Image: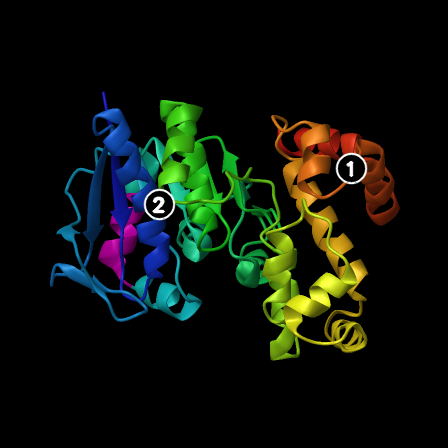
Amino acid sequence: MSKTVFFLLYDGLQLLDVTGPAGVLTLANRLSNNFYDLHYVSANSSGKVIASNKMSINTDPLPLKSNMDVLLIPGGQLNYIDQAAKNTELMSWMKVALEESNTNVSVCTGAFFLAKLGILKNKRVTTHWAGESILKQRYPDINVISDSLYQQDGDLWSSGGVMSGVDMMLAMVSKDLGADISLQVAKLMVVHLVREGGQSQYSLPLEFQSRAKYKEINGLISWLHERLDQVTLVKDMAKHCNMSERRLHNYCQESFGLGPAQLLAEIRLEHARVLLRDVKISMTEIASICGYSQTSGLSHAFRRRFGISPSRYRENFRAETN
């Protein structure tokens, strides 16, 4: 038994919206005797589409009979999506295919195609954070879930940003073939963590990196994140940045509005919040990974920062995603 998966492509698409999910399924095939039968189709008579990065992708014609298990629609900039939506052949085929397919998937702003065809009415869906407000404005009858990696509503799957398409497909592989194969695929792809769909699209460490005003502290965030389980003093940070503690303090205040020690505490607690969403990781392990010698230290710091205990946060997250 296998699943037939069609990727519907168009000019201007975001290439990673295709190669990310396709890479997951291709690796899953190596571990499952080719469970997924992959096809790449378009309405272009030339037999190819040009992605937004100008790379060319060969495609097959739109099949007369869809006969598919999964239809995946990648995203792209909205001007490319609006242009593609003017192609009556593409949209007519897509409407029939969406009705006949067992599972419909949108990656990033690919949700705009489904919305235009009325597939998302009263459905729970997510898209790239930059397009959320536009999707809500254009289609007020859609239940747009803000700041979510991916969502599943029955036979409809949708993901937020580019890389969350990988998270979504790993979740789909887990449902189809089991968690073991999904984790093996994640390991082969060097995915840092298999993430649940309800997690935020935003990354606090990345946000801090984007706010760093001085090149001397550009690498500080990643350095701290890689050694959260170790004792790190302000003097250690200053030495890593090759500057005095006073200058480091001033640079951190100007960039983040936090002192170096506060910055480290924020990164520790944010990582703890991510790990709490995985019920397989014990509270003791989370405390150790995030640099707390005891769970009581984590609990006190977490409650003070977020106004809720770690255990209650875990319970609330599970309730929201079930």
Res. 260 mark = none
Of helix, strand and loop, which one carries label 2?
Answer: helix
Residue type beneath disc 2 = Pro
Tell me the distance, in whole angstroms, between the alpha carbons under discs 1 and 2.
39 Å
Question: Crowding at label 2, few (<14), some or many (≥20) Cα neighbours within 10 Å?
Answer: many
Res. 21 mark = 2
Considering only order in the chain, which callout, 2 or 1, is on the residue closer to the N terminus?
A: 2
Question: Crowding at label 1, few (<14), some or many (≥20) Cα neighbours within 10 Å?
Answer: some
Of helix, strand and loop, which one carries label 1?
Answer: loop
Res. 293 mark = 1
Asked if residue 222 lies left or right of residue 291, the reply is left
Residue 119, percent across and down?
Answer: 43, 43
Q: Is residue 167 magenta?
A: no
Residue 174, percent across and down?
Answer: 42, 28
Asked if residue 266 lies left or right of residue 305, the reply is left
Q: Nearer the viewer, residue 308 or 54?
A: 308
**Residues rendered magenta in the picture:** 87-96
Residue 258, percent across and down?
Answer: 80, 66
Q: Nearer the viewer, residue 247 or 207?
A: 247
Quadrant housing residue 182: top left
> Which part of the image, by quadrant, shows the N terminus?
top left
Most extreme residue toward the top, as rendered?
1
